[in-house]
Image (spheres, helix red, strand yellow):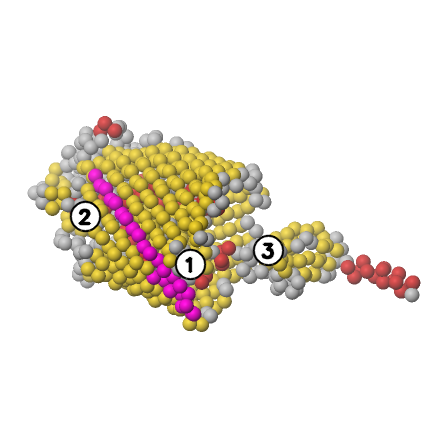
């Protein structure tokens, strides 16, 4: 018997040799069915019901184990294996991209994959890959979205979604439609990324919930919640172009159930630069101040919050010798804009079923474009009562809303004869939507919104959606919706105010109408080697009638506005591809678009509309979680551009162009992060392919231009190409390569 025991003890080390044992958990609980894979040996096993796993016959040596499970972020663990290795419990974290909560699709918190409406979500880390002073610049690497520069002098801009002009995009802050009309020109530059908790993007119709003007899609900027914000944070950086940006934030508790977040943004760019030697500033100079205050508390277990923001901005662009004393004069050309803006937002839950939301905006703009003044003000009040309820397989959502707009300026848009007549209108509305689960894998969404416009009567905006979900990682969505939009030329199209082109409005402009269909496919793929791949593909078709498109071609000295006597179409395919593995992340997107208008039997592509585009953001770890590199970029195909005549030496079509950036991050500890990088690595600007960008920059008031009886410019020795002053030839940033350096500090 003694010999037998000794024999077993002698065999025991042999039986244990070459084994690796461990336990897989999630939030401390056993995780059955997780894959444990030895990377170099291409061998693996699955965890058992108690979470334990065992790998046998593993030779001594150094290995990398990959632990993965569908719906969880894979982990890689390096080990030095000698005969028997017992690992500490390995806890996997859930893949947040599957469980992201979105608000924009149905005005309530819903799992992103459960939503019938496709919603793209972008966290602050996405914006931090290329630090920018405003939302307008920060979203330039989202596939299908292009911030469009509309003026080479004052750098106004709007946001194009899937080839549609900026006015077709509705921009919300915390779900409130406060960025519109007058604010759409300059307001986007005043939203600092540091106050953003996340950005939700819907491409396609969303009119049932947000109004009939959400034709191209919406961008919902969701601000930080005080209860989840750091006690103090600071984000500061500067560039070699002498741009300086600072974001500061402070969170303080308010009793046991409340907290307050204060955010301050300061931006200063005061050094005129003229690298293309046309005696005009390449980039608009700006001084901007913004303060943000948000309060959050609970009453009866229900969330309540209210937010205030004030923005002041002083910007100017023009001839290099311009000074404030030249403002509004006709000796030195400059475009100077003073913007003062106040915002109020509130969101109060009354109980589990009822909620009240409201907002108020006061936007004041004092501007001059050369010697043309434009003084405008807009006040927007909005309130809605929202009801939601679950009954069986149906999720109901309904509400009533009212919106008041008061718009006034010094143009003919708000004049009746010799009297000033501000545009004032109430737009009451109501909406009802039902999402019904036919079967566990099928959902159908039906919704209708009814608004009353005082000039156009009752407006119906229906939408419908269908979702089929094969499993937790694969689904298909199909959505349909309509749109109805009343156009305000002076607030939406800056070109109507700048330069020497004459503004012509052919007739009484009628509202635009549209319908849209969108199909979306989503797939998540988990591999045993620790990679997570995501595919998000969409196809869309939008049809417009009565569309209003500025006509630069009929007469080179005019901008003519009229309803299209025909129809227009925007259609295309978008593809987003994501990859994640062990701190490496990549997001790559491509968009292929066919945008055209048909009038009098002729088909034509609109100005400033590319046929294809691409974006990418790639993050590569260099030294664990201490040092990493972010490489971001976009690329755009050719687009048609507005030239003045056939003799205009500027190219009538843009080249393929790309903006690329690189950033290195050093995380010293949990509080401090330092970063260094280069913007516009290729040093590309639109001036590289043209003799000039601004026509007649040497004569911005057309003092030396001769005109015929019809108002057409005539050729002369001083003006051989018969040009007039024109800054509308702008389609891309005119800012060259520059280095940036900064740091951020966060005290939790």
Q: Please tell me which residue lies in front, 224 or 11.
A: 224
Give percent across and percent down for residue 134. Answer: 37, 42
Give the spatial CA distance, label 3 vs label 2: 58 Å
Q: Quadrant of residue 138?
A: top left
Picture disc at residue 423: 2
Question: Please, what secondary structure does the residue beneath circle 1 have?
Answer: loop
Q: Residue furthest bottom?
A: 439
Q: Is residue 461 visible?
A: yes
The nearer-to-camera label among 1 and 3 is 1
Closer to the camera: disc 1 or disc 2? 1
Q: Quadrant of residue 14?
A: bottom right
Secondary structure predominantly adopted by residues drawn in magenta: strand
- Front residue of 693/501: it is 501
Residue at the image position 48 percent from the left and 68 percent from the top: 470
Which residue matches tag 3? 27
**Residue 660 seen in render:** no
């Amino acid at each position: 018997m003694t010999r037998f025991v000794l024999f077993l003890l002698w065999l025991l080390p042999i039986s244990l040799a070459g084994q690796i044992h461990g336990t897989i958990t999630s939030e401390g609980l056993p995780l059955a069915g997780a894959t444990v894979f030895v990377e170099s040996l291409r061998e693996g096993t699955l965890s058992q019901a108690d979470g334990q796993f065992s790998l046998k016959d593993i030779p001594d040596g150094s290995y990398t184990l990959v632990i993965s499970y569908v719906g969880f972020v894979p982990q890689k663990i390096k080990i030095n294996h000698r005969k028997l290795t017992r690992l500490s419990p390995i806890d996997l974290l859930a893949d947040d991209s599957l469980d992201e909560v979105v608000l924009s699709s149905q005005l309530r918190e819903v799992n992103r994959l459960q939503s019938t409406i496709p919603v793209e979500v972008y966290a602050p880390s996405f914006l931090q890959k290329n630090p920018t002073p405003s939302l307008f610049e920060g979203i330039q690497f989202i596939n299908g979205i292009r911030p469009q520069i509309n003026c080479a002098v004052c750098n106004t801009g709007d946001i194009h979604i899937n080839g549609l002009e900026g006015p077709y995009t509705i921009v919300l802050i915390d779900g409130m439609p406060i960025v519109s009309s007058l604010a759409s020109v300059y307001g986007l530059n005043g939203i600092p990324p540091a106050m953003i908790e996340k950005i939700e993007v819907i491409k396609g119709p969303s009119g049932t919930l947000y109004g009939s003007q959400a034709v191209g899609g919406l961008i919902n900027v969701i601000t930080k919640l005080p209860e989840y914000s750091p006690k103090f944070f600071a984000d500061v950086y500067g560039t070699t172009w002498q741009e300086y940006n600072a974001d500061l934030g402070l969170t303080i508790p308010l009793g046991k159930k409340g907290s307050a977040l204060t955010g301050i943004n300061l931006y200063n760019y005061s050094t005129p630069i003229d690298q293309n030697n046309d005696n005009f500033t390449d980039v608009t100079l700006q001084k901007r101040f913004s303060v943000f205050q948000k309060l959050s508390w609970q009453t009866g277990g229900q969330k309540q919050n209210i937010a205030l923001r004030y923005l002041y901005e002083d910007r100017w662009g023009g001839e290099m010798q311009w000074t404030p004393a030249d403002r509004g004069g006709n000796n030195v050309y400059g475009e100077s804009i003073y913007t003062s803006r106040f915002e109020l937002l509130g969101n109060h839950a009354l109980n589990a079923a009822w909620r009240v939301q409201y907002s108020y905006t006061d936007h004041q703009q004092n501007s001059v474009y050369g010697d043309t003044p434009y003084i405008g003000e807009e006040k927007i009040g909005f309130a809605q009562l929202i009801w939601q309820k679950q009954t069986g397989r149906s999720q109901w959502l309904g509400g009533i809303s009212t919106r008041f707009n008061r718009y006034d300026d010094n143009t003919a848009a708000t004049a009746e004869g010799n009297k000033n007549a501000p545009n004032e209108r109430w737009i009451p509305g109501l909406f009802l939507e039902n999402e019904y689960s036919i079967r566990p894998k099928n959902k159908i969404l039906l919704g209708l919104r009814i608004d009353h416009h005082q000039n156009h009567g009752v407006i119906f905006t229906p939408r419908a959606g269908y979702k089929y979900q094969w499993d937790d990682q694969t689904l298909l969505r199909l959505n349909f919706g309509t749109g109805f939009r009343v156009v305000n030329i002076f607030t939406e199209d800056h070109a109507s105010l700048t330069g020497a082109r004459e503004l012509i409005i052919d007739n009484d402009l009628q509202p635009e109408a549209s319908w849209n269909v969108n199909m979306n496919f989503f797939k998540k793929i988990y591999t045993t080697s620790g990679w997570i791949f995501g595919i998000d593909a969409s196809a869309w078709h939008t049809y417009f009638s009565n569309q209003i498109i500025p006509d630069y071609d009929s007469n080179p000295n005019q901008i003519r506005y009229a309803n299209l006597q025909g129809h227009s179409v925007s259609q295309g395919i978008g593809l987003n591809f994501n990859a994640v593995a062990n701190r490496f992340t990549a997001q790559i997107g491509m968009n292929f678009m066919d945008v055209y208008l048909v009038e009098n039997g002729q088909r034509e592509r609109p100005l400033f509309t590319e046929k294809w585009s691409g974006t990418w953001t790639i993050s590569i770890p260099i030294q664990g979680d201490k040092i990493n590199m972010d490489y971001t970029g976009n690329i755009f195909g050719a687009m048609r551009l507005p030239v003045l005549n056939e003799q205009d030496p500027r190219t009538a079509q843009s080249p393929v162009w790309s903006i690329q950036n690189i950033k290195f991050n050093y995380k010293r500890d949990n509080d401090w992060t330092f970063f260094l990088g280069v913007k516009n690595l290729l040093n590309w600007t639109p001036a590289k392919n043209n003799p000039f960008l601004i026509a007649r920059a040497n004569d911005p008031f057309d003092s030396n231009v001769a005109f015929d009886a019809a108002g057409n410019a005539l050729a002369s020795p001083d003006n051989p190409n018969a040009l007039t002053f024109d800054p509308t030839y702008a389609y891309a940033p005119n800012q060259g390569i520059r280095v940036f350096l900064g740091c951020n500090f966060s005290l939790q």
